[in-house]
Image (cartoon, coloured by chain):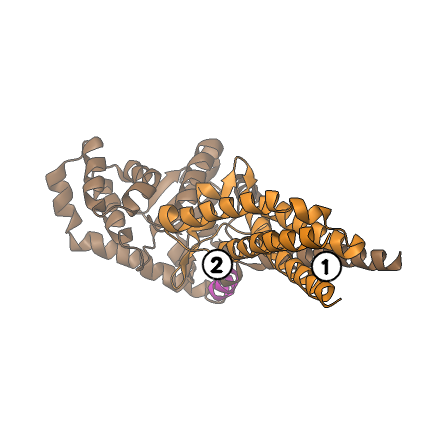
Chain colours: A orange, B brown
Amino acid sequence: MSQIISLFAWIILFIVIAFVGFADAVYLTASHYIGALPTCTIIEGCDEVALSEYSTIGPVPVALFGVLFYTAMLVAGVVWLDVRKSILFRYLPYLTVPAFLFSMWLVYVMFFVIDAICVYCLVSAGSTTLLMLLSLYLRMRLTETS
Amino acid sequence: MSKRFVLWGGLLLAMAAVIFIMIRLAGDEPETINSGTALANSNASAGSEILDIRPNDWTKGNPDADVIVVKYSDFQCPACRFYASMDDRLSQELGEDVLFVYRHFPLRNFQYANLAARYTEAAGRQGEFWKMHDLIYINQQRWSRSDDAESIFRQFAESLELDLDQLDEDLEDPTLVERIESDFEDGRRLGVRAVPTIFINGEMIQSPNSLDAYRTLILSYK
């Protein structure tokens, strides 16, 4: 029983992190479509990351992929809460590991190519990393118990 | 059944709430510009003559156009590069309907912003302000990260076949430096706090986020 409770807590944590990532990615996507172009201010400098060619893949903003990814993670978490079956979590790393690698590449580009920092992008990279670690851990736990 | 309803309903509701809030936040972002507008409007009587076209302004388009777009801009700011290319497109597209005016607002936190402004001014004395302006913006990513931006500016000057001795003399000319300084001071008096800041027919506008929005805005002043 205690094991199930702690598993429940892990899944809740997973959902909470996915939710943070979701909010962050929605903000970045919304800024892309409706926000004014980032200007440079006397005090704060400018938002070079959002203007860079790396912020989109073709016409699609990278942040939109983030929205889809976090939505998938949220759905997976809620599916578990709903049916308490682990099948989905067995396959989750197939999504979270590539997402993590992509995210690391974006962080690399941000620091070494664009040479600028975007806090919202770092939040997203952080939540993707945590989701990957959690998904690997949960996969282990869930394959043990089922 | 009801648990399932609560779970999925809760998820959907939470996601919808987040989307709503984030879209509001993203849309509200240019707060600083709005406050700048308020400031500019309150100073409108004091500052409006600053926006009048002067004989030594760098302009592109029809001097008698109904719509006059005055832009305070910086050569090293990435957003300004964006607007420079949009201005260029719109100037070609709208032709006689608009006059674009360029004013300097080099931010102190950019290493080469002032140097770039001086090079365009010096090129301007040989009749090539806009060509230098274009070269500097188009190649911004190249020189802004370089250790020696000046040698790149010199290459531009050579490619424009400018008289380099004259250019060197002009670059050091105090009146040229003062001119950039006075543009900057004018901008500050108008309430410019960020670049680019655009005034259409004397009104500070919230920078449009796309070419289409920009075109529509300009045409609305016709």
Residue at which label 2 appears? A119
Q: Residue A146 location in percent, x, y?
A: 73, 52
Task: Read off the magenta span.
Answer: B33-41
Quadrant hosting residue B51 = bottom left
Tell me if I can see residue A64 in this picture.
Answer: no
Q: CA distance from mark 1 to mark 2?
A: 23 Å
* Chain under disc 2: A
- Residue drawn at point x = 68 percent, y = 53 percent: A144
* B36 is within the stretch colored magenta: yes
Closer to the camera in the image, A77 or B10: A77
- Mark 1: secondary structure: helix
Q: Is residue B58 above or below residue A80?
A: above
Question: On the rendered structure, is A61 left or right of B194?
Answer: right
Amino acid found under the numbered disc labelled 2: Val
- Residue at image mark 1: B14
**Amino acid type shown at disc 1:** Ala
Most extreme residue toward the front is: A144
Chief secondary structure of the magenta span? helix
Residue B6 found in image quarter: bottom right
- Marks 2 and 1: in contact by CB < 8 Å? no
Judge the density around disc 1: few (<14), some (14-19), many (≥20) Cα neighbours within 10 Å.
few
* Point 85% across, 60% down: residue: B3
Q: Residue furthest right?
A: B1
Residue B46, given in percent of the width and then of the height, sits at 42, 65
Instruction: Give percent across and percent down for residue B204.
Output: 48, 56
Q: Tell me residue B181's x, y (percent).
A: 27, 58
Secondary-structure class at tag 2: helix
Q: Chain of mark 1?
A: B
- Residue placed at 55% from the left, 48% from the top? A32
Specify the label residue A91 is tagged with.
none
Whether residue A20 is visible here, answered yes or no, is yes
Whether residue B170 appears in magenta in the rendering, the answer is no
